[in-house]
Amino acid sequence: MGTFSPAAFRSLFTRHRIYWQCFFGAYCVGLDQILPIELVSSLDHGSDLELIRGQCGIHFCAVEEPNDADGHTRWRRNWIGASIETAFQRRRAAIERQLRAHPRQSWWITSSPASDHLAMYCRENGYRYVGPSPDLTASFQQKQRLVEALRELRLPCAQGEWLSLRGTTYQELHGRWGRRFVLQKAVGAAGSGTRLVQSEADFQRAVPCFGDAMVLVSPYIGGVSLNINAAVIGGEAFVGPPNVQLSGIEALGSTWGGYCGNDYSAADQLDQDLVAGVQEQAARIGRWMAGRGFDGLYGLDFVLSERDGRAYAVDLNPRWQGSTTLSIQAELASGRLPLAAAEFAYRCGVISLAEVRVHADAFGRPLAGAQMCLRSSAEQALRVGGNLHPGLYQSPGKPRFVRSAFRLADCATDDQWLITGGVPETGTWVAPGSWLVRIYTNRTVVGPESSALSDWASRVAAHAFAASQLTAVSPLAE
């Protein structure tokens, strides 16, 4: 396994097929080249999934896919914070028809993130569930676990204190944490449950959002955000390269703190000592998790402090991340075994820990590639009036559609980009805050020191929004 061969790796799974449950159907792109993925259930549906189905033979069962029960009305929902269990529960009949078409022993069933409901279904029906413990994964989602790790490991910690906002005033928190501070729920995703407070008015607006729950109050340290993918495999931590994480970019439809993309190409421009330090922190935290029974994929978000330039871990994600698919495709494009694929193969028992270790250095090397995740920033539902084609586009000059495509590797030059990620079809209603599309490119889209969107990237994003033609036509008027 020292030299990676996609065909040889896929041959390890002979006589097996995979049913994969995930939030977004396009997450399977990349892994589909080296794993026998036959069935995918997801929350979203888009025209690019039809393209993937046609070229790869993968059967998709999506919650958003039109059916007779909803009168063929297409809705793009805001799935941030939704339960992954919805993917199976809402499409169970269609999924079971596909499962019954082949012997039970031929299926390996997995979910990203881990699913207690799907694991139980497998136990009750004789299927093999492949994945980490859902209960253990849930315990590490609590933000308190990261605080615990940082303090035990004596790593830089910018976390503050837990309290109820009901019995606290802005002036009290201002006095302890300064003019700007951050409020976080115990569990969140894609920036949900996180608020920046800079004034009394901000605080008063935030209080109802948190209710009586305990809230983590931390100082605002500002700076560039970094994200990293890693995995605990066989009790050992393996770490990938960091990427510059995009968050709160208005041109992508995001509010402050909202996740909206990743840029590996920009991270390659960072100071190498800083990169090595972030990777070492991620590895130490992974080993700490392993000592408490965790195994599987995990990720970390860091902030580079404007005050002292240090990297502070601010979020622990014991799961598949929004950047994981980009990482997989970039690893494949560079001829490397993806870390996520190695973790899955080891869990299936088709490769050994020794074979994973052979790739440890390669896992951590820099990658090229970036993605921008566009969201609807409107406060009401909008209807897609345009016909945004999934596929490869090119500039300079006026952006033009080149051909149908759905892989990062299809971007052959720096002036090409890919529109994918559940592209909503004409007539789809898009709920406030929901994902619209993902734009992939090998080109840097942000500056490594400021995270500000480049002019080129801004124009590409503006083109995608304009081509979607989101309008506020009332459904009652149709």
Image (cartoon, helix red, strand yellow):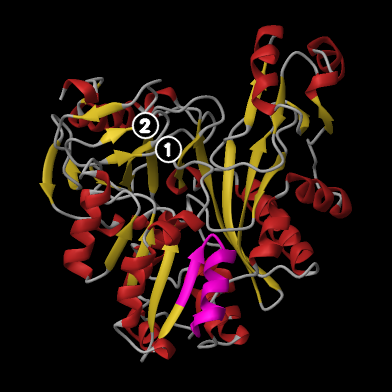
Decide if residue 300 is in sight here: yes
Is residue 412 in sight in this rendering? no
Q: Position of residue 331 (x, y in %)?
A: 42, 64
Q: Quadrant of residue 98?
A: bottom left
Residue in the foreground of this view, choosing between 380 and 326? 380
Image position, residue 211 (x, y; %): 71, 26
- Identified at 74% across, 58% down, the residue is 285
Q: Nearer the viewer, residue 171 or 369?
A: 171
- The span shown in magenta is 109-128
Where 230 sits versus 471, above or below?
Answer: below
Residue 431's tag is 2
Give the residue at x 56% y 30%: 257
Residue 180 drawn at (x, y percent): 72, 17
| Separation of residues labelled 1 and 2 (CA atoms) | 6 Å
Circle 1: residue type: Asn
Q: Is residue 111 magenta?
A: yes
Residue 8, magenta (yes or no): no
x and y, in percent, of residue 95 in the image: 35, 69
Q: Secondary structure at mark 2?
A: loop
Report the amino acid beneath label 2.
Answer: Ala
Relative placement, left or right, of 283 versus 172 is: left
Q: Given contact means CB atoms under 8 Å apart, are the residues at marks 1 and 2 in contact? A: yes
Quadrant holding the C terminus? top left
Q: Is residue 215 left or right of residue 175?
A: left
For the point 57% across and 35% down, the residue is 192
Which residue lies at the image location 33% right of the left edge and 39% below the top edge?
A: 76
Q: What's the mark number on residue 78?
A: 1
Answer few, some or many: residues within 10 Å of disc 2's Cα (few below 14, many 20 plus, some between 14 and 19).
Answer: many
Badge 1 or badge 2: first in the primary sequence: 1
